[in-house]
Image (tube, coloured by chain):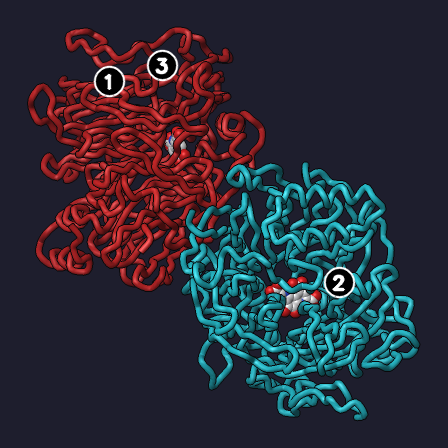
Chain colours: A red, B cyan
Amino acid sequence: MIINKFVAALAGTVALSAPAFANDEIIKLTQDPNQWVLQTGDYANTRYSKLNQINKDNVSKLQVAWTFSTGVLRGHEGSPLVVGDVMYVHTPFPNIVYALDLNNEGRIIWKYEPKQDPSVIPVMCCDTVNRGLAYGDGKVFLHQADTTVVALDMKTGKEVWKVVNGDPKRGETNTATVLPVKDKVIVGISGGEFGVQCHVTAYDIKTGKRVWRGYSMGPDDQTLMDPVKTTHLGKPVGKDSGINTWQGDQWKTGGGCTWGWYSYDPKLNLMYYGSGNPSTWNPKQRPGDNRWSMTIWGRDVDTGMAKWVYQMTPHDEWDFDGINEMILTDQEIGGKVTPLLTHFDRNGLGYTLNRENGDLIVAEKFDPVVNWTTGVDMNKSSPTYGRPAVVAKYSTEQNGEDVNSKGICPAALGTKDQQPAAYSPKTQLFYVPTNHVCMDYEPFKVTYTPGQPYVGATLAMYPAPNSHGGMGNFIAWDGKTGKIVWSNKEQFSVWSGALATAGDVVFYGTLEGYLKAVDSVSGKELYKFKTPSGIIGNVMTYTNKGKQYVAILSGVGGWAGIGLAAGLTDPNAGLGAVGGYAGLSNYTALGGQLTVFALPN
Amino acid sequence: MIINKFVAALAGTVALSAPAFANDEIIKLTQDPNQWVLQTGDYANTRYSKLNQINKDNVSKLQVAWTFSTGVLRGHEGSPLVVGDVMYVHTPFPNIVYALDLNNEGRIIWKYEPKQDPSVIPVMCCDTVNRGLAYGDGKVFLHQADTTVVALDMKTGKEVWKVVNGDPKRGETNTATVLPVKDKVIVGISGGEFGVQCHVTAYDIKTGKRVWRGYSMGPDDQTLMDPVKTTHLGKPVGKDSGINTWQGDQWKTGGGCTWGWYSYDPKLNLMYYGSGNPSTWNPKQRPGDNRWSMTIWGRDVDTGMAKWVYQMTPHDEWDFDGINEMILTDQEIGGKVTPLLTHFDRNGLGYTLNRENGDLIVAEKFDPVVNWTTGVDMNKSSPTYGRPAVVAKYSTEQNGEDVNSKGICPAALGTKDQQPAAYSPKTQLFYVPTNHVCMDYEPFKVTYTPGQPYVGATLAMYPAPNSHGGMGNFIAWDGKTGKIVWSNKEQFSVWSGALATAGDVVFYGTLEGYLKAVDSVSGKELYKFKTPSGIIGNVMTYTNKGKQYVAILSGVGGWAGIGLAAGLTDPNAGLGAVGGYAGLSNYTALGGQLTVFALPN
Ligand SMILES: O=C(O)c1cc(C(=O)O)c2c(n1)C(=O)C(=O)c1cc(C(=O)O)[nH]c1-2
Ligand SMILES: O=C(O)c1cc(C(=O)O)c2c(n1)C(=O)C(=O)c1cc(C(=O)O)[nH]c1-2
């Protein structure tokens, strides 16, 4: 299974001189388990590795092989990349990039430190995180906090091109990774708490020239929708569907941000991602379904045109951004291998759709405490087909402004937030890091001012009541049936991305700082190690000189860790997260470290 | 050998209710190798541990057991303490203190974060370091950057008392640990680059009330010298010896700071330490011997009276602060077991004295490249007895102001700086982390302004020419004969404190971030591990539940690492250190982590 990486990398590079696309190279590289060239592991976002040197029988012997301090504190999301024998490590703001020589004990080959105006920091809703680099076309792509997209020469760290995607002065920032695909790099934007009209944008991979931009709301020429050909649950969306469920001009400050993970199906030529909350968090102020916030999108990567959409949470009342990753698998449904898309939404429902046409197959709670909905109407002929039934008691819209709706599960940060799940084709199970947190939510009137917070709700968060007392679970999920297979309790939300491997092990990190390895079949804990700081990064694996390594970034932060990261103590601060996660300070302090594990020689 | 620590700790605590002194308890605790209650390991500053579970045969199997991020970047000097089952970890500015529960996977029992005005940062000459806590009388002592001395209740972290020792607005800061002894806590002060008249001060261990203060220069009632009884190389110092080698009032801004390590001999009731450079660095501006800068001191801890002094570098011309640790051993000299004091000075000479009377026994170069002196006059009847003979070519005094004296070895940061050596009674050898760095030094006229830098020289530093190319060595030294027994080359200065153990292993850290273990007899490298950041902390060891651990703080900085720590790039910046150590940025980035090692179970 272990291919010579230099040859593999070279093969990729050589392929570029032919009129091949970046994704030919990337597909080849993502099929080589010795490397890790996209944050998501592969275009399908499976976070699965075929490596099996480290396996369920020996993982308990894992040791720390080497470590690297990034020189930056606060929340470290994402993971390093490995291309050939070089590891690329990124940091939160100021978004430093290091190229480390894996053949030379992690020596720093180059360092890139962008100059960014620190005034962007207060415009970032949920810590100064960055979800990492992506590789393609001989370049390493960084999408900075201030929305500058930079292509760096992988060998020298020199800027090849640079483009500005948004304006922090208008509330636009970035935390997401990018999707290098074909001749493009596709990027999103943040700002749902600032009333930004969010979008995805494709730039030319060679030059940085803008190719297309698709907004989450707006007229068809902005959303890149075809009234007839673009479908929602099998039906044409109709003309200007991105306007006509908004009052007046509200779509212009509509949110629907695109700060999550992107996947891509080369056969269908579609990219998939979700859009975030409608702005403001006060639902009373924005009547209507607020399309296409809270929506799963399938877009043609060449033209940006939307092929299909599915709005999970029409007229959001809880900040359940729909941006979590879309995991692409081919599994048997009704005896037929079907191209599936599985998505664990903030709203607490795990969705499985047919990714070719957007058909809804499964929509089930992946945490039993979810109480804002009784479930999704799965009756195709019902007028509310595909809509979640809202429980009046937990409806902040129905309870109204200045009323504190209590005991809503999940909390605004959802049953799952940005922390990506993994999928193992061996078990055909999804491994999902989850939050087990509920909230009180009180909406209030707010006026829009460009570049100023446009939130309009006061929140308090706490562990799910009458449960195990902890704030998280790590679960295994059957995406075909929508059932939890096993569930491990965790004291805090699992804010770290999972990794599944052919060694029948699943890895994830905890907010206290443990890297954990569990049996992919039973969930049994096989190994844990206390890294320097709380983990909100994603586990990755690679080989060097034929030996398998597992790597994780530590550095507590993100929305869950914002109290520690930003030094906040008022329980309602940090959009309500500070109180809920106050106990974290008994376990860990700020950090920014890479820890690399291996078996003893 | 492994004593139940709880019993040991308790025994100590109980002893306190009797009219016993803190040092009765501390001596007991420092004799228990399971704990580490002083930065220096023991009052004798040997940094030797009787633990031998980890030894030269198995040290190669060492693993990382757990880690902890301190939440602070920049230079981490000193080490954690272990008292009972609690580890106390400190940080550089803002000088946070954590109490970690060793029985509960390092859970944070309490955290103390002083509020300090950050305007102290630019008043610190050589990074925002702090050399750590000390334990005594049920309290943990912190001496903050802003010179506030705080006694914290070891159980709760609550302030028991607090006293202000100096004023950063006048250039007074602190980086040193403190010496808890008898009914006192004795502390030093920094400010040699700001024209401070430095001193050691004793505070009441129960109340923080000031008991005595002894200055490095000034009239006898300030230096606490007796013209007759206080001796220098066996001769009475005479009246006001701390004034009469200075021009006019210059002693009032004379420096001689006391920022190093303190040792104590309970039998002789003397404490030992060295004083730093005379201010300014421009020797032309301050004619005379500048007593008692650059001096080894033996003071009575009850009264503060100086028993003897020895000035190593009269009229300093190179910033060779005499503050390095005094290691107290009893070894045979001329067939007689003699109470010795061994000191590796910045000036490149390794001194051995009789610590009872201050007799000079050995003064030899501990790096052959040292060139500013041909050696110390050891002829007792010579008028220059005990003085180093200065080589004219390297005399910045003789070359004069605005002349660049080139090729002086060692550089201003000396053949050894603050990084403490260790001594093994098994081998009777000293293990010395050294610098192998030379310099160009150009003095210039400077005027004194309170609180402003008072440096008066421009420096450039570089690896010792015509040598192995590296900037450091780790050596074994015979203190009786003044000879190097073995010497290991290092690419950078070894800025980390050594630890010698009964397992015949010596540990130290490197600026690139390696923890290294070498054979105490041969110097052979037995183990190395790349910690997250460059190491300038000191290795310590302890046991928990019968198992031996080795711990080290990473976090590059200090004078050698000031370029990285403070983000400086001009080669002459950082008092000349930035250029010399520029290569460090290829190996490591800022950090602040504790890494704890153990053998596999
Ligand atoms: O609407 C937005 O633009 C936006 C942006 C981000 C972000 O950029 O990280 C988050 C959120 N929303 C959000 O709702 C959320 O829960 C969240 C968590 C995190 C994180 O990294 O921990 N970011 C974000
Ligand atoms: O004269 C002084 O007051 C003074 C203070 C300090 C300090 O407080 O750390 C250093 C020095 N001098 C000094 O000369 C020096 O080489 C030095 C190195 C370091 C360090 O921690 O790396 N501190 C200091």
What's under tag 1, amino acid-wise?
Answer: Ala
The image position of residue A378, as x and y in percent, is: 20, 11
Q: Name the residue under label 1.
A: A363
SS assignment at label 3: loop
Tell which of A49 and A160 is nearer to you.
A49
Q: Which mark is residue A287?
A: 3
Which numbered mark, 1 or 2, is in the foreground of this view?
Answer: 2
The vertical placement of B550 against A480, above or below, is: below
Q: Mark 2 lies on which chain?
A: B
Q: Is A73 on the left or on the right of A190, as rendered? A: right
What's under tag 3, amino acid-wise?
Answer: Pro
Q: Label 3 vs label 2: CA separation? A: 77 Å
The image position of residue B391, as x and y in percent, is: 65, 91
Which numbered mark, 3 or 2, is in the foreground of this view?
Answer: 2
Q: Which mark is residue B264?
A: 2
The image position of residue B297, as x and y in percent, is: 78, 70
Q: Mark 1 lies on which chain?
A: A
Same subunit: marks 1 and 2: no
The image position of residue B112, as x and y in percent, is: 65, 41
Which quadrant of the figure has residue B317?
Answer: bottom right
Instruction: Respond yes or no on whether mark 1 lies under 8 Å from ligand 1.
Output: no
What's under tag 2, amino acid-wise?
Answer: Tyr
SS assignment at label 2: strand
Tell which of A102 and B165 is nearer to you.
A102
